[in-house]
Image (spheres, rainbow, N blue to C red):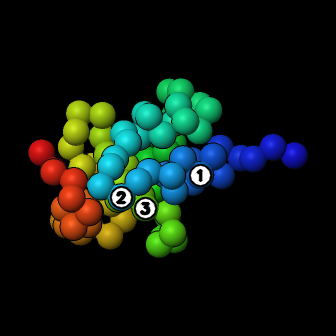
């Protein structure tokens, strides 16, 4: 049996290196479902597994977007990793 879209999203997000980001749309493409950016957002919103760095997924316009632990926490984590938040 193949992996689910959720599994593929988690795999793609786990592979984002520290200090780097991908947009929700880019994650959707890497997970095999272009156009499913909103679904990626829903999956990330429900993620509380610290092994999945969902704070590294941002909006296509470069804005940080939401985070299930608060937007300020997301920005702080990105800055700690050396990513310049615009």
* Rendered residue at 15%/51% (across/down): 84
* Rendered residue at 43%/61% (across/down): 53
Q: Residue under label 2, please give it.
A: 18
Camera sees residue 75: no
Question: Residue 85 location, x and y as percent?
Answer: 16, 50
Q: Label 1, label 2: how many angstroms apart (C-alpha)?
A: 15 Å
Quadrant of the rendering where the C terminus is positioned: top left
Please rate how many residues cluster around mark 1, counting C-alpha atoms within 10 Å: few if below 14, some from 14 to 19, many from 20: some
Question: Residue 49 location, x and y as percent?
Answer: 51, 71
Give the secondary structure at mark 2. Answer: loop
Q: Residue under label 1, please give it.
A: 11
Q: Residue under label 3, please give it.
A: 53
Q: Can you say whether 33 is above or below 17 in the image?
A: above
* Rendered residue at 34%/47% (across/down): 21
Give the secondary structure at mark 1. Answer: helix
Q: Earlier in the sequence, mark 1 or mark 2?
A: 1
Q: Can you say whether 40 is above or below 14 in the image?
A: above
Q: Which mark is residue 64?
A: none
């Amino acid at each position: 049996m193949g992996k689910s879209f959720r599994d593929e999203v988690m795999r793609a997000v786990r592979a984002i290196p520290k200090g780097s980001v991908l947009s929700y749309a880019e994650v959707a493409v890497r997970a095999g479902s272009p156009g499913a950016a909103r679904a990626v957002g829903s999956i990330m919103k429900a993620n509380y597994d610290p092994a999945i760095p969902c704070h590294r997924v941002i909006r296509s316009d470069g804005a940080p977007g939401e985070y299930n632990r608060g937007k300020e926490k997301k920005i702080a984590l990105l800055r700690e990793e050396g990513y310049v938040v615009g």
